[in-house]
Image: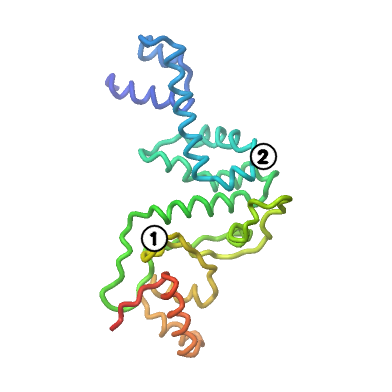
Amino acid sequence: MNHLDLFFQTMRAFLVGQIPIDTVESQLGPSSSGSRRFAFYRTLVRNDHHGFMEKLYGFTQDVLQDHFSGCVSRYLTAHPPDHWEPNQTGARFPEWLRHDSEAILIAPWIGDLAQYEWFEFVVYTDPTPDNPVESGLSLNSTMRALKFEFDVPGWITSGRPLAEPNPGPARRDLILLMYRDSRTLQCKFLEATPWTQLIVTSLENGDDPLRVATAAGADAETATQAILELTRVGLLHNTSS
């Protein structure tokens, strides 16, 4: 390993808390700034990562309160940041929370809440151009289909995260379709009904949703109205002449 590779490998391990300052100095030599000042850089990096997580997971932090910082520290130890975009540090946090005994004890639905917050960020910042097809129906390209075990979306929109006392969202299995409306650039969502899922799946498979819906037993008028409604809210694009 050349010296530059050794430097970056050692510094990364140090900055994410995997090795102490003594190990760094034994491999790279003493810092001209002094060990104490050099070690302070790790504190700055840690504070930055905690700051990103706080901005990404505001509701999650409100629920976990004083436990949030400890959860983030344990998460960053388990999943050291490895992406050039700092916000990507939080990508695996929702799934990690589902298995963190301390967080689950406080709120069994904490993983669903974090998932909602993460994908709200993902959808809003999705760089994919939402370009409809030249002719016909197409899906909003920013759409994500998310499974929930608790009614976190309804709980958030009803203002319950700020309520005291706060019982948390009700347990209810649902599929949420989250997307960015290209007309307003707002992040929106709707709960998937069986017909919505059929329409979305048929478009994903390259099929005609009206034909698939009527073949599944829906009358043409009902299927057409469902498609028009999904177009009205911005989940579908219709460029048919």
| Residue type for callout 2 | Glu
Task: Tell whether 188 sits left or right of 141.
Answer: right
Task: Tell whether 58 sits left or right of 227.
Answer: right
Judging from the image, the colouring scheme is rainbow
| Residue type for callout 1 | Leu
Q: Find residue 99 and report its horizontal and vertical position in percent.
A: 61, 44
Residue drawn at x 48%, y 29% as measured from the top left: 46
Q: Find residue 113 and report its horizontal and vertical position in percent.
A: 58, 52
Residue drawn at x 49%, y 30% as measured from the top left: 47
Residue indicated by mark 1: 185
Residue drawn at x 64%, y 36% as measured from the top left: 67
**Above or below, comparing residue 131 to residue 239 in the picture:** above
In the rendered picture of this protein, how many numbered marks are placed on residues? 2
- Whichever of callouts 2 and 1 sits on the residue coming sooner in the sequence is 2
Label 1: how many Cα within 10 Å (few below 14, some 14–19, many 20+)? few
Label 2: how many Cα within 10 Å (few below 14, some 14–19, many 20+)? some
Task: Tell whether 238 sits left or right of 145.
Answer: left
Q: Are marks 2 and 1 in contact (CB under 8 Å)?
A: no
**Above or below, comparing residue 159 to residue 26 in the picture:** below
Residue indicated by mark 2: 102
Q: Find residue 239 and report its horizontal and vertical position in percent.
A: 30, 77
Q: Secondary structure at mark 2?
A: helix
Q: Which mark is residue 235?
A: none
Of 15 and 153, nearer the camera is 153
How far apart, in angstroms, are the residues tagged by discs 2 and 1?
37 Å
Q: Nearer the viewer, mark 2 or mark 1?
A: 1
Q: Quadrant of the C terminus?
A: bottom left
Q: Quadrant of the N terminus?
A: top left
Residue drawn at x 48%, y 54% as measured from the top left: 119
Q: Secondary structure at mark 1?
A: loop
